[in-house]
Amino acid sequence: MRWTWPWAARPDGAAARANEAPAERKHAGAGFVALQLTGEASWTRRDYAGLSREGFMRNPVGHRAVRLVSEAAAAVPLVLYDGTAELARHPLLDLLRRPNPRQQGAAFLEALYGTLLLAGNAYVERVETDGGGRELHLLRPDRVTVLCDAAGWPEALEHRVGSARRKIPLGEEGRALHLRLFHPLDDHYGFAPLEAALTALDTHNAAGRWNKALLDNSARPSGALVYAPKDGGGLTEEQYGRLKAELEDGYFGPTRAGRPLLLEGGLDWKTMGLSPKDMDFVEARNGAARDIALAAGVPPMLLGIKGDNTYANYAEANRAFYRLTILPLVGRTLAELTGFLAPAYGAGLRLWYDADAVEGLSAERDSLWARVGGADFLSDTEKRQAVGYGARGESEEKAGFRADQPRVP
């Protein structure tokens, strides 16, 4: 768009004032128009680095939501079944307890779940060591590219570190596993849950920066000091600079909050922004926080967000968190790990979680046991099967451990 300024060709314009001495140059000596056009919003990049930086490293709600999901999921006890028998000791369990020399099992799984939330993808590489052992390593999603065959099916991963590149095969005989969350528009990569809350993340971060700027400027919105003398004169360069310096020295900054502004004749203060009350600042920030929690699958009550008491109490919200977010995430991850790791140790092995050992579901477990225990029409074997145990003596004989040994190692 081209603007035509009506005073551009006036002889008393900029060309006529060029010969004036600086001290004699006047401000606001002639009428002027100041245009302020609202620009487009600035959004965080939709990639792993952008979401990690803005959604995890700089946003307290996103950080806590990701940590809450990943830590809770990594703390769920794992069990290994051979058919229907539960195994207390097995090399596969040892591998998951210590995947590599740098990480324990809980730290490895926490990083895996956190990567899934931030990238929608997680890449696990299986390494055969010289001594015949195995190790599991996580690969950063921003360093991995999925390679496809001529038919468009994934066949390998390309991992980049600096200028070095290496190819890791996928598939049943491959050494890598690609876990991904559902993406409606991509065949090979997953969709990060926090990406759906990108608008809320940017809103929450911008609200925090704006609040900090208000505190640095005496908690006052932006404004303009207007000089409109009755005689039509203007300010000299020296007067303009002195007035600006007095404003900055006397009224800007948090240590000068609440100081009254003393104006001489012809000066008037015009507010050029909205106050926090006008913007409904607190509610907008809480609304953005609720959207972030919703995208991560965390009840807002667990993150301390006020004004969203959907659940009757904290315990009910915690049970819903485990049932609707944690256990489905852990279940699908263990199913993928079973298909990736179990064939190397023999057929019939299956990884799963022990819901009875989850502290957040203890109330549901007590209720189930009470109902099953009071069912007189069920035999002892049927009661054991109803609560997830095998027939008496069945799993013990197959697994080869004593009857007084605990169920969960």
Image (spheres, rainbow, N blue to C red):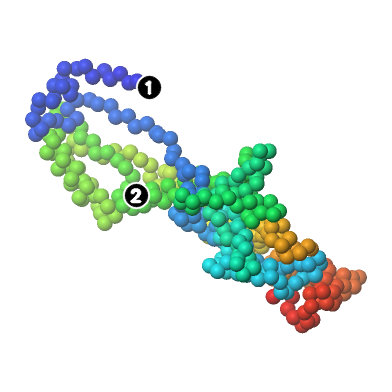
Q: In the image, is 379 to the left or to the right of 188?
A: right
Residue farthest front in this picture: 130
Q: Earlier in the sequence, mark 1 or mark 2?
A: 1
Residue 68 pos. (x, y %): 56, 61
Residue 78 pos. (x, y %): 68, 67
Name the residue that disc number 2 marks.
213
Q: Nearer the viewer, residue 140 or 333?
A: 140
Q: Amino acid at mark 2?
A: Ala
Q: Check the image and report above or below for 104 versus 263.
A: below
Name the residue that disc number 1 marks.
1
Query: Looking at the rendering, in which quadrant would you find the N terminus?
Result: top left
Q: In the image, is 328 to the left or to the right of 266?
A: right
Residue farthest right in this picture: 377
Q: Amino acid at mark 1?
A: Met
Q: In the image, is 26 to the left or to the right of 316?
A: left
Query: Looking at the rendering, in which quadrant would you find the C terminus?
Result: bottom right
Secondary structure at numbered mark 1: loop
Residue 185 pos. (x, y %): 63, 39
Q: Is residue 367 visible?
A: no
Q: Which mark is residue 324?
A: none
Residue positioned 9% across, 34% down in the render: 23
Q: Nearer the viewer, residue 295 or 335?
A: 335
Q: Is residue 206 visible?
A: yes
Q: Nearer the viewer, residue 274 or 96?
A: 96
Secondary structure at numbered mark 2: helix
Query: How many angstroms separate mark 1 from mark 2 (CA)?
Result: 33 Å
Q: In the image, is 29 to the left or to the right of 35?
A: left
Residue positioned 66% across, 38% down in the render: 150
Q: Residues within 10 Å of mark 2 (few under 14, many from 20)?
A: some
